[in-house]
Image (spheres, grey):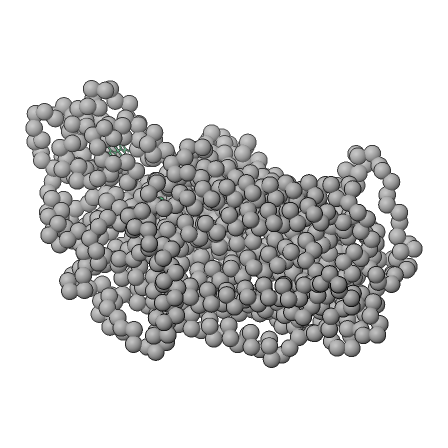
Amino acid sequence: MAPDSMPIARALSLPRSERKPWLEVLHEWVITVDHKKIGVMYVLYGLLFMVAGGIEATLMRIQLAVPEARFVSPQVFNRLFTMHGTTMIFFVAMPILFGFANYLVPLMIGARDMAFPRLNAFSFWMTAFGGLLLYFSYVGGAGVYGAGSAPSFGWWAYAPLTSPAFARGHSTDFWTLALLVSGVGTVGFGVNTVATILCMRCPGMKLTKMPLLVWLNLVMGGMLFFTISPLTAAQLMLMIDRYLGGHFFDTQAGGKATLWMHFFWIFGHPEVYVLIIPAFAFLSEIVPVFSRKAIFGYPIMVAATVGIGFISFGVWAHHLYTIDMPSYGQAFFVGMSLAIAVPTGIKIFNWLATMWGGKIWLATPMLFCVGFLFQFLIAGLTGVILANAPFDWQLGNSYFVVAHFHYVIVGGILFALFGAFYYWFPKVTGRMMDETLGKWHFWLFVIGFHLTFDPMHIAGILGMPRRIWTYQPGHGWAIWNMISTFGVFVQATAILIFVFNLIHSYLQGAQAGDDPWDAWTLEWSTSSPPPPYNFAVIPEVKSRRPLWDLKHPEDPDWQYE
Amino acid sequence: MSAKTGLSHKRARGWARIEALTCTVITGAVSRLFASAPVGSQPTNIFAPVSTPADELYHLSLFDLSVCAGIFIVVFILLVYAVMKFRRRADDDGREPPQIYGSDQLELAWTVLPILIVVVLFLTSARVIHTVEDAREPANALRITVVGHRFWWEYRYVQYGFVTADELHVPVSTPRHPWPTFLTLLSADTDHGWWVPRLAGKTDVIPNRVNHTWIDPHRVGLYLGQCSQFCGTAHAMMLIRVYVQTRAQFEAWLKNQQTAAANDPGPAVTAGRRAFESTACINCHTVRGTVADGRFGPDLTHLMSRQTLGSGVIPNTPENLRRWIQGPPAIKPGVEMPPMNLSSRQLNELVAYLETLH
Ligand SMILES: [Cu+2]
C-alpha cells in the first residue's frame, strides 16, 4: 500500500458523526450546501426516478411482447413512452451524472467545495422540483377541461401535438414547466461547474494537469449553456402559443411544426453528448487505474472531447432527415455527423492503448468499463450507419433507432455509471461494495441488456416503427419482441441485485480505507468518506497523477509531462 | 449522371467496384439472415427492395454495413486481445508496468485513417442522396397527392380527378416501360410519416408543408407499411397498403374509380341509402354522385373496391363492415369516427347500401 500521503489530513479528519435523530439528519440534508451531500442527493434522486422510468419501460415491453396485445390501452401506452423518455433523460441520466460531477470535481481539483455552494443547492432543488412537477401531471393533468393525465406526445413533444387543439388539459403545461424549471437547475449546475474548475484548482494544477474527468466535466458544463437555452426558449414559445395566443408552432394558425423540431434537436443532439461525456470521464479515470498505466495520449483525449463538444452543435438535423430537406442540406449534416465519429474513435483507441501493455485487474468497475467499450463500439457504428441519411430514411423512427440509442444510453452511459458506482462507492461511504454481488450484477446485466436491445435492431430492419402501441402478426416482428421483453426481466433482476448490493454494502461492507484501488487522483488522498472540508491542508500538485508521484518518488510523472 | 428521370444510373466509378466487392460478403450474410425467410412472412423488410429509392438505399446500406462490420471486427479483436493478454496474472509481482504516456505516430494513424473512411462514407451517401432526392419527375409520371389524416390516408389522383382512401394503387414500372409514381405529401392535422419499406424510405407528412417522395415498383404485388411519425392515440393502426398492378389492371381500376356512384342503386337498398344520407355519415364521408360530400373521413364512393377497412386494420367483409359502423373504437381505439348508435335494422340496411358501392 501507499505510504500515508496526507498525515495532516488524517490527523484533523473528524470521527464519523454519531447517530442523530432522523429529523435532524433530514434537516441537515435539506439545508446542506456541501457539494458531497448535494452530489449524493442528486444520485439518490436519479435512482428513485430510474425506478419510475424502469417500471414504465417494463409495462411497455409487456404490452409489446405479443402481437395485438391488450395489456394497456393505447392512451396509457402513449403516456408511458412519453414519461419514460422524459424521465430517463431529464430526471435520471442528468441528475446522476451531475451528482457524480458534484461529488468528484472539487475533490479531484483539491478544492473544499464548488465555487457557488448555495447556487449548487438551488440547482439541485430546482431539478428535483421539476421531476415532481412532471409526475404531478398524473394527478393534476386533467385540469379544468377534464381531459388527459400524463402527457402523451412522445418526449420530443413535436408540434402540433402540443397545441391546444390536440393537447387539451394541463399535462402539456406540466411537462413544459417541469423542463423549464429543471432547465434552470441544469444551467445553474453548468455555471457552477465551469466556475469551480476554472477558479478553484489547487496550487500547481494547471489546466494541463487536471485529471481527465475534470476536463470532460468542464466541457460538459460549458455545453450546458448552449444546450439548454434553445430548449428553454422553445418551452417559453410553446407557453406563449398555449396561453397568449402565439402561433410559433400552432400549425392550424399558420405556425411551423419544423420550427419546433429544429429547436428541440438543437437541444437534443448536444444533450446526448452532455450525457456521454461524463461517461467518457469515468472511463478515463477507471481504465488507467485498473490497467495500472497512465492514460494514453492525454492531450489528444482533451482535444477530442473539445472537438466533440463543438461538432455536436452542428449535427442536429440528422434527426430530421425525413422532413424532406434539400439534398445539399442533408449532405451537410451527413458530413458533420460522420465527422463526430473521428474524435469518438480516437477516444476508443486511446483507452485500448491505455490497457495495452498494462496489468488489467478485472474488478467490477473495470468489468463495466470493458462492457462499455464493447457496447459503445457497436453503438458508435450503428450511429455511423444512421448518420448516412439514406439509411436513416429507412431506419429513422424504427426500432433500429431505439436499439441504437439504448446502446448509447444503457450499454454506454449506464455501464460507465455502474462502473463509477463500484469505483467511488468506497470513497463516499467508507465501505467496499460486494465483489461477488458485483459480478452477478455485471453478468446478468450484460445478458439482459443484449437480450433486450439486440433483437430491436432486427425488428427495425424488418420495418417495425417505434412508438406503436401494438402490431399485427405476420411481419416477422413477434419473436424479436418476445425476446426483448424477456430481456427486460433479466435486466430488472440485475438492477435489484445492484440496489441490494448498495444497501447491503453501505451497512455491512468491508472497510475501504482511503485508497482501496491504489489510485492516483486527489480524492483518494483524503479520508473515506471525506470530511466536510475535504482537505485539511490544500494539496499541491506537480503532475496529473499526484498520488503516483507520492507513491513513486523515484519515478514521478512530472518528469515526463 | 443521367438525371433525366433519375431512375437509371451507371456505377462507373472505380471505388464503386470496390464497394461492390466489399459488399459481397455482407450481402451474403444479410440475405441469409433476412431474405432466406419467404418475403411473405417479412412484408416490410428493408432488405427486400422492389423500387429504385429502396434499392439505392439497400445497396448503400450493404456498403455501410460492410465498412462498419470491418471496423467492428478489428476493434473487437483488439479489445479481446488486450483483456486476455494483459490481464493481471495470479503470480503477479506487484510491480507497476512500464508507463507509456502516448505516441504521436499511433495517435496520428488513428486520426487520419478514420478521416479517410469518413470521407468515403460521405461521398457514397451524397451520391445516393442526390440520386433519390434530386430525381426529376418525368412527364408521364403518375402524380398523387397524399393527405395524412388522424388516422387514415387520403389519396388524390390529381391527373384523373378522383379521390380514394387508405389503399394506394399504382402501376408497375419496368425499365422498358417506366411509369413511376410521384407523391406529394400533405397533412390535414398533425405530423405523420409515409413509409413503405420495400418501396422507399420514409418521408414525414407535416402540416403547412409540402413534401415529396417517389416510387417505381418493379414488381406486381401488395406492399405494406405504416405511419412512421407519432400522430396520436391510434398511430399504431394507421397502416399503409400499396397495390402494384400491371398496366392493364391499373387502368381498369382507374376507370372504375373515375365513375361516380350509381344514383339509383336499386329498391333493395333505398332504405339503407336513406339511412346513410339522413344521419351524420354524410358530414364526414363523400359518395360521389350523391348528396354525401363530407371531407373529414375517407371517400366511400368505391368502398367495396377496398380489401380492408379502417386504414388496413380489418378485412373488408360484410360482417366487419357492420362491426365497424356499430363501434369503430372497439376495433381501432382512438379512431376519429364516433360510434353511431344505430338500431340493428338500420345497420343491416346501411351495410346493404354500402355493399353496392363497388
Ligand atoms: Cu399518423
Q: Residue at x 62, y 59 (%)?
A: A370
Left or right, B213 with respect to A392, comes to left
The percent position of residue B287, horizontal first and vertical second, equals 17, 36
Looking at the picture, tell me which residue is in the foreground, A470 or B36. Answer: B36
Q: Residue at x 71, y 54 (%)?
A: A423
The percent position of residue A269, horizontal first and vertical second, equals 51, 58
Q: In which quadrant will I find the N terminus of chain A?
A: bottom right
Instruction: Please determine whether, in this image, residue B114 is positioned above or below residue A263.
Output: below
Looking at the picture, tell me which residue is in the foreground, B302 or B308. Answer: B308
Residue furthest to the front: B91
| Numbered label tally | 0
Instruction: Please determine whether, in this image, residue A221 is positioned above or below residue A121.
Output: below
The percent position of residue A98, horizontal first and vertical second, equals 66, 52
- Residue B203 location, quadrant: bottom left
Left or right, A375 with respect to B20, comes to right
Looking at the picture, tell me which residue is in the foreground, B258 or A283. Answer: A283
Camera sees residue A521 = no
The percent position of residue A137, horizontal first and vertical second, equals 54, 36
Looking at the picture, tell me which residue is in the foreground, B18 or A64. Answer: B18
Q: Residue at x 49, y 50 (%)?
A: A453
Residue furthest to the bottom: B105
Left or right, B73 with respect to B346, comes to right
Q: In which quadrant will I find the C terminus of chain A?
A: bottom right
Q: Residue at x 14, y 44 (%)?
A: B257
Camera sees residue B306 = yes
